[in-house]
Image (cartoon, helix red, strand yellow):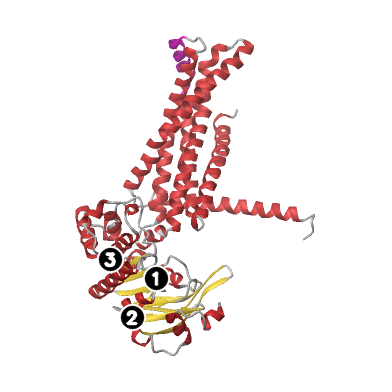
Amino acid sequence: MIEISGLSKSFGAKQVLRGVDLVVPSGQSTVIIGGSGTGKSVLLKCILGLVQPDGGTIRLDGQDIRNGARDAFLARFGMLFQGAALFDSLPVWHNVAFRLLRGSLARPKAEARAIALDKLRRVGLDADVADLFPAELSGGMQKRVGLARAIAADPEIIFFDEPTTGLDPIMAGVINALIREIVSEMGATAITITHDMSSVRAIADRVAMIHAGKIRWEGPIADLDTTPDPYIQQFIHGRADGPIGTLR
Amino acid sequence: MSRWTAPLAALGRATLGALGATGRVTLFAGETLSHLVRPPFYFNEFWRACLNIGWLSLPVVGLTALFTGAALALQIYAGGARFSAEQVVPSITAIGMVRELGPVLGGLMVAARVASSIAAEIGTMKVTEQIDALTTLSTNAMKYLTVPRVLAATLCVPLLVGVGDIIGIMGGWAVGTTRLGFNSTTYLKNTWDFLQFWDVGSGLVKGAAFGFIVALMGCYHGMQSGRGAQGVGHATKSAVVAASVAILAANYLLTEAFFSA
């Protein structure tokens, strides 16, 4: 379980997070929604230690993440980045097996390659792509490779940052279905950031909306459509008029 | 602020900015050196950097040395003729190449080719979140990206300078024997007899220092890159300018240290 309490972060004069409180239950898929620039990605990066928060605490299974070995902490996570963030200089299978070729999770090269091929197959890619370079793949294929890399070491917690941005609706549907299947199959805890409501409905067990640097609403996906919260209603229906628009 | 104090304020801001940048580069260099001696070591990245920095820079460094040596021989011949000292062409060409022009021009050419390439590569990795991805994959970006490149450049640039020295001297020999009427054997004997070990050694030490500077500046500016294409472009330009200026400044300091009376 991830417990976030009073998390704040500013960049210069701009305060992005103003005391975020959120509990992400183990084994569930939580989707964080919110407008652009509301701090969704910053929140994920704070959890991973990529951005240092100004205040507040983040606990993983009751332990403050600032305490304890960083490598062991990161080994529990997998992340799919918005643009896939594949390493251009490495072939696809090296990208997928990156964590398995070095560090505390290192395996023999042949075993790492076999695992990479298995994970590629899991996300619907043939072994033929294993020796290609990321630049030779389409955007959708790159996302799939990024997904394969995120699950390569069977992490307990997986983060998905805008998994369907820039994809056509069919490919977005494929990626959403893959994420849902993989998270259910692995029993992983997942946090997904998206503005895409079809992704929210396909992926989420729980939904949290971030607005003005705080969690505005949080609850099960089943309650999303029935909540009277005007911010949620404006966001999920994509209305131009409403409290979010007036605050911008 | 009055119009009289505004220039002083601007000067103060520029000075503080320069001191801040120097401090940040120094800390970056210290961090790089501390990672050099602590595992893990990424040998594949190191060999890849050696290939890119050393082997692939050889043509540009070789051509630069060849034409520089040839031009130097012509200049020394023309200058020496003013006081009937044309015979010094082989020795002065050789000493000019191995002490100064080989390392400095080699370093500048490597700065143009390698510092730009490193800054653009790492800058692009930063803006496309590849460096964040490295961190989430439990890999320290300094160790994985900076250390192999800095080590490879520090070891490879002296080798490039050594090869450039030989090519430069041969450029002078080619001009001396075909255009200036020198006997081939005499030209080479004069060159060999005149050069001392430290003439060559000092140039190679300079090459190592310049290699370190080039890769360090490339990595530093890449890591500091701003967002988007403009950010990467600015980082690339800054890396080349900073590396070139630092090479020329370091060259003066090293020459002062090695050869001042």
Residue bearing mark 3: A151
For marks 3 and 2, the one nearer the N-term is: 2
SS label for mark 3: helix
* Circle 1 crowding by C-alpha within 10 Å: few under 14, some 14–19, many from 20: few
Does A20 sit above or below residue B194?
A: below
> Tag on residue A25?
2
Amino acid at the residue labelled 2: Pro
Instruction: Please identify the quadrant where the N terminus of chain A is shown.
Output: bottom left
Could you give the CA–CA distance between mark 3 and mark 2, rounded to whole angstroms?
19 Å
Instruction: Please identify the quadrant where the C terminus of chain A is shown.
Output: bottom right
Residue bearing mark 1: A67
Quarter of the view holding residue A87: bottom left
For marks 1 and 3, the one nearer the N-term is: 1
Amino acid at the residue labelled 1: Asn
Q: Chain of mark 1?
A: A
Q: Which stretch is magenta?
A: B183-198
What residue is shown at x 55% (from left), y 45% (from top)? B242
Q: Is residue B75 left or right of residue B127?
A: right
Amino acid at the residue labelled 3: Ile
Could you give the CA–CA distance between mark 1 and mark 3, rounded to whole angstroms?
25 Å
Whether discs 1 and 3 lie on one chain: the answer is yes
Quarter of the view holding residue B5: bottom right
Residue A116 picture location, percent across and down:
24, 59
Most foreground residue, A19 or A196: A196
Most foreground residue, A137 or B125: A137
Quarter of the view holding residue A80: bottom left
